[in-house]
Amino acid sequence: MGTISSALSIMSQALDADQEALNVVANNVANANTAGYTEETPDWQENQPISISGVSYGQGVTETGSTSERDRVLESRLDQQQQLAASSSTRLTALDTLQALFTSASSSSSSTAGNIGSDITSFFNSFSSLEANPTENSLRQSVLSAASTLAGDISGAAASLNSQKASLDQEAAGTTSQVNALTGAIAQLNQQIQTTSPNADAGTLEDQRQEDLSQLSQLVGINQITTQNNGMEITTTSGQLLVSEGTSYQMTTGTVNGVTDFFVNNTDITADLATGGGSLGGYLTARDTDIPSALSSLDQLAYSISTSVNKQNNSGTDYDGVEGNVANSANAALNIFSEPTTVAGSAASMSVVMTDPNQIAAAGAGDGTGDDSNAIALAALNSSTSTIVGGKTPSNYYANFVTTLGSTVSAVKTENTAQEASVTQLQTQNDALSGVNLNDEASSMTTLERSYQAASQVFTMLNTVMASALNLGDQTTVG
Amino acid sequence: MNRARTKIGSGEWRTVMRVDPFYATNLVSSLDQAQASQQQLTSELSSGVRVSSLSDDPVAAGENTVLLDQIQQDDSFTTSSSTVTGQLQVADSALGSVVTQLTSAISLATSANNGTMNSSNVKSVSSQISGILDEVESLANTNYQGQYIFAGGKTSTAPFSTSTTTSPAVTTYDGDQDVNYLVTPSGQKIQLNVPGSQIFLASGSSSVFGALNSLIADYSSGTVDTAQAVSDTEALSSALNNVSQQRVTIDNSITQVTAASDAVSNVETQLTTAQTNLMQADIPTVSTQLSLSETQQTALEDVIAQLNSSSNDLFSKLPA
């Protein structure tokens, strides 16, 4: 049989429980804008009823803490998508800088400086002009000045590419300290979580671990594997262990072939990181794929123009009657450009070595200086039948390069837009579940307030009932 | 929209519709996008150029490079062709004068050959033809902008010189047989010169200087070997025909250069139109897009302002 005092005890427990629940709500409201905070809901548990003479009496309620509103699958998907988006967005930023070097001229009348496409045309056109008057000094001068502009713009673009590569390298290397700090923090959190909450959600600790994972996902591509006792293993997408429960493995850097490579446990994981994702993946893709590809196209262009033009100029006779030396073009008298020895690096080192415009060999070998057959041959290096650069004319090769580069940038842009949209969608889903919704909190607050008021009212009434029982009907003795 | 099981207050589980409490943040990123698109559209409007970076339209960017290359080639050819036309016209007019001179030499020789002249008149014919020879030689050594135009490739030195140590005197050619060409953007080769030896020292009986020198020698003594003189006069006639024929080559070149230059100008106009169409922003479309984007921005700003106002919160409705 129930007693008044047990009813009083039930109500005092209810008041405690309501207070604790209010505490949870207050904590939610306080953390409404905390990054990584997961909304918590109070847990209620009905007390074990007691059975007296076959009749079961309820024993009130206990507040047993709170549960974080978390969906691990959703969080992990969000992390993965963030890795992809961070990678493509970093790569896109690098590509945007890269493509600015090759932005097309809008019209033929604009200044040609800075535009390699126009430079190529102007250079070979200067030979066409020379056909009309092969002995004219001003036309010869303009060949040399067009050559200087072309060489200057190509070597300038190559220098910009190289310095962009160096700065990407630096930024990538700088990422390692952030990665190491995060993996260290996650290992520590793993230990705490495994100790304090091996079987259930660890609340705030898990919030912190999830926030660290999300930050790590911005930096590198990772796989997360949940282990026993709520522990976690983190590997790179290629499977190299970064965190194993309570232990983290430091990522180190070292210089290999002039660029920074990345190591974990003495294994070089640079190539895997490049394809893995995260901003590090983006940096490395731009550094190791995009820039080298642009540079190698420029190298090919510079090498072919330099060697072909030198060879052709040495096949003729200059204004002073000097004939070039085709057999040994490296020591040839009539080189216009410095003769490159290898394709690699040709763009960066492209320069004009000829200073005397008289050395331009407009005349054919053995011909008088008024002849223009070699000028025709020089101009023909960029005519539609020429195949000096990769089977194309220099102009077409450059146009092809521009289209390829533009298509790459455009493809990465599209990819990034799609990935960002997917991140937003997942983020919305995750926030809908885990974010603190102030309206919900206000409603919980009101409910709990009412419930607390009710409990205290019941308590007061029970108190009156108890007083009546003590006084046995005498209203004056106990108030 | 997510559905989550939750239990609040009452202790009873229920399924409620959850919304993203940070939806205003997403709206702000939409606002950023609207502004970025306005920036792009405004820059298209102000520059008039549709493709401001390669990734805007990679194919157009590549095509543009090729078109500009062709336009510049055409432009450069148009400039060259006017230089070349000047040079060809100088050659043509020099040969025109040569024809006049040779015609008068032939009429002088013909009158000397008919046997009615006395010795001193014959000698005078000799010196007149000698004067014509000097004139023709000077025409054959015509230079244009410092370059001897009938010297083949050896344009830096005067190609013709006459040595009077022998009789008849001998005019020699120091030039070469080189022929220069101008290549049009379409690959057509236009001949720019005729080597002087082909015009003035043609082999056989068509040598201008040979015939003139022979005639001077024929008449120098005052007595005429009529058979020899008639034969030399015929040689001069034949030489005159040859000069006229060679002049036709020059005239043909002038016609070709003019025709090629006109054709190239037409092509250039077409290419420029194509290039402009390719790269130019479509102003009405861009303006419409800009206006739409502005409307969207205003709407977004209103929505965000509305959502962020304090009355949109259940807390604000609770009793103080």
Image (cartoon, rainbow, N blue to C red):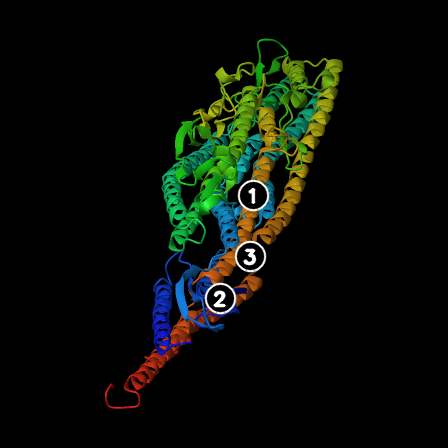
Chain letter, disc 1 residue: A
SS class of the residue under badge 3? Answer: loop
Near-viewer residue (B81 or A391): A391
Quarter of the image where the C terminus of chain B is located:
bottom left
Q: Are marks 3 and 2 on the same chain?
A: yes
Chain name for mark 2? B
Please identify, in this view, whether the residue under mark 3 or under mark 1 is nearer the observer: 1
- Say which residue appears at 60% left-offset and 39% top-offset: A400
Q: Is residue A57 visible?
A: yes
Alpha-carbon distance for marks 3 and 2?
Answer: 55 Å
The x, y position of residue B46, in whole percent, is 48, 58
Along the line of sight, the residue nearer the viewer: B135 or B90: B90
Q: Which mark is residue B281?
A: 3
Report the disc number at residue A432: none
Q: Chain of mark 3?
A: B
Q: Tell me whether marks 1 and 2 sit on the same chain.
A: no
Give how far across and how far down residue A3 sits, in percent.
Answer: 38, 77
- How packed mark 3 is, by other alpha carbons closer than 10 Å (few <14, some 14-19, many 20 or more), is some
The kind of residue on which mark 1 rests is: Thr
Residue A455 in the image: state x and y as whole percent.
Answer: 37, 77
Q: Which of the two marks, 3 or 2, is nearer to us in this view?
A: 2
Q: Give the image quarter of residue A152.
A: top left
Residue topped by disc 2:
B6
Amino acid at circle 2: Thr
- Mark 3 near mark 1, Cβ–Cβ under 8 Å? no
Q: In the rendered structure, find residue A408 and report the number of the disc placed on it.
A: 1
- Callout 3 and callout 1 share a chain: no
